């Protein structure tokens, strides 16, 4: 599944990966311009992936997954620190023991039931409600399934579909593809098993049929998906959301499209933030996680920053009651978003990496967290770390002298700490208890 692509793969398709906090693209960010017709396709791809990043920071679905992942990292690092303090050498075993724990949080982002076949045949997209087991809630819950006229199956309106429909609408919007021609583009990212990739467009297609009076179904679909991702129990919330939309349409409340969008957004976000304790409980969980952090460990600094970012994202939505959608989602919009919600690491071809703004401290912090997740992932996968992966596989290291390269390639665990702790591999190995015992003991009081 493409959502499970890892940073170290050779795949050239752009993607965002919460597990390591990067966007990987197959073009240079500096060459992109939404005003340049020759680069608009690449910019649309980047915008698609940046939307996934924003979903992580600004929606309850994303933040709950982020909290779950950060909690696992915290517990793992604490277990390793205790192991080191006791003079033991079980870091590899501790990291591997978290393999299943790290898999669990993906459910929050990518839970998806397989398509179902019901004794219904239609030439129009319709939806049905089914009660199924929800692994996020750990109980039975209502879920929505939309009929796809291309394969005659009912597809789950899952967190995966919501995330992809929302990101795809951003992609279509910047490319200037209107709703009359979108269906000509639904085979984007085709696969042999799923040539129509309905997770990218099926919600849009349903709205196109259901609400012909709405002239901006791209914006409507984006709104709908963003709202749906603002709930833990997305299935039951979607049922409410669809009923509320029908009520607006049937009771003559749809008089002006702009007013309709404003009414829809504010009424639903108001319901989410004021009539439920989800936002409050998430903020409490963020503060609880922050309270567990020991301030004298460098590894915890990026976690603190990301938790603070998650809290600010929640409060931004709660207080402003606005969508992150913009009618023109261009480079100016991206810069505006990055000032509020910062930036992931952006991995580009030929070992180029960057962020959307210049902040050396934040880049260093995120780099350390990136390093910890990469090395942990390699250990869990039983892959070799006898050389530094940040030198060749993911060339993110800024040090490039031939002497340093030789050490990194042949004896990475013997690298001494550089001035101000500048070696990403050293810091990562220190945090994960992978250095030699005499080196680790320098940091034990």
Image (cartoon, rainbow, N blue to C red):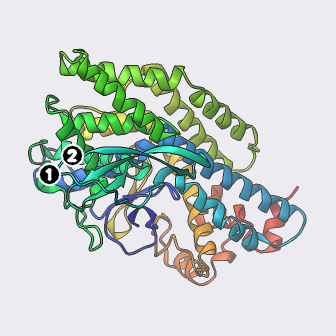
The residue positioned 28% from the left and 67% from the top of the image is: 194
From the top left corner, tell me how far across and down residue 73 is, in percent.
66, 55
Determine whether label 2 and label 1 are within 8 Å by CB. yes
- Image quarter hosting the N terminus: bottom left
From the top left corner, tell me how far across and down residue 216 is, in percent.
17, 33
Q: Secondary structure at mark 2?
A: helix
Q: Secondary structure at mark 1?
A: helix
Pointer 2: what residue?
205
* 240 and 24: which is toward the camera: 240
Q: Is residue 301 above or below residue 196?
A: above
In this orientation, does residue 423 appear?
Answer: no
Toward the right, the furthest residue is 86
- Image quarter hosting the C terminus: bottom right
> Considering only order in the chain, which callout, 1 or 2, is on the residue closer to the N terminus?
1
Left or right side of 387 for 188: left
Pointer 1: what residue?
183
Q: Is residue 368 above or below residue 405?
A: above
Measured in 3D between alpha carbons, the distance from the residue under mark 2 to the one under mark 1, in whole angstroms, is 8 Å
* 240 and 93: which is toward the camera: 240
Left or right side of 70 for 22: left
The residue positioned 29% from the left and 26% from the top of the image is: 246
The residue positioned 15% from the left and 47% from the top of the image is: 175
From the top left corner, tell me how far across and down residue 421 is, in percent.
64, 58
From the top left corner, tell me how far across and down residue 322 is, in percent.
37, 24
Left or right side of 162 for 436: right
The mark total stands at 2
């Amino acid at each position: 599944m493409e959502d499970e692509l890892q940073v170290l793969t050779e795949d050239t398709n752009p993607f965002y990966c919460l597990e390591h906090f990067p966007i990987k693209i197959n073009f240079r960010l500096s060459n992109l311009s939404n005003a340049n017709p020759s680069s608009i396709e690449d910019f649309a791809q980047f915008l698609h992936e940046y939307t996934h990043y924003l979903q992580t920071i600004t929606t309850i679905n994303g933040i709950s997954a982020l909290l779950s992942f950060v909690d696992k990292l915290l517990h793992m690092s604490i277990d390793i620190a205790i192991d080191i303090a006791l003079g033991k050498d079980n870091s590899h075993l501790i990291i591997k023991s978290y393999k299943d724990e790290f898999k669990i949080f993906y459910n929050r982002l990518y839970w998806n039931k397989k398509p179902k076949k019901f004794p219904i045949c239609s030439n129009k997209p319709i939806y049905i409600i089914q009660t199924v087991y929800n692994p996020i809630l750990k109980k039975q819950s209502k879920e929505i399934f939309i009929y796809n006229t291309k394969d005659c199956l009912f597809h789950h309106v899952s967190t995966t579909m919501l995330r992809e429909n929302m990101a795809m609408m951003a992609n279509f919007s910047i490319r200037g593809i209107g709703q009359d021609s979108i269906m000509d583009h639904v085979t984007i990212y085709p696969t042999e098993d799923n040539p129509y990739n309905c997770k990218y467009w099926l919600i849009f297609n349903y709205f196109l049929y259901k609400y012909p009076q709405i002239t901006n179904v791209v914006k409507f679909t984006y709104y709908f998906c963003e709202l749906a991702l603002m709930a833990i129990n997305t299935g039951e919330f979607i049922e409410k959301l669809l009923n509320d939309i029908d009520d607006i349409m049937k009771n003559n409340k749809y008089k002006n499209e702009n007013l309709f969008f404003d009414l829809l957004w504010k009424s639903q976000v108001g319901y989410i933030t004021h009539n439920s304790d989800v936002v409050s409980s998430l903020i409490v969980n963020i503060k609880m996680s922050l309270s567990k952090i020991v301030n004298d460990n460098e590894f915890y600094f990026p976690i603190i920053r990301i938790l603070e970012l998650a809290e600010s994202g929640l409060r931004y939505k709660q207080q402003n009651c606005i969508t992150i959608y913009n009618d023109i989602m261009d480079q100016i919009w991206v810069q505006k978003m990055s000032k509020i919600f910062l930036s992931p690491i952006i991995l580009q071809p030929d070992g180029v990496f960057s962020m959307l703004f210049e902040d050396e401290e934040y880049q260093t912090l995120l780099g350390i967290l990136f390093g910890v997740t990469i090395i942990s992932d390699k250990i869990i996968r039983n892959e070799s770390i006898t050389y530094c992966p940040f030198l060749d596989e993911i060339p993110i290291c800024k040090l490039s002298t031939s002497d340093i390269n030789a050490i990194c390639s042949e004896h990475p665990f013997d690298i001494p700490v550089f001035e101000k702790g500048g070696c990403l591999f050293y810091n990562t190995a220190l945090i994960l208890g992978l250095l030699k015992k005499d080196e680790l003991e320098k940091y034990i009081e």
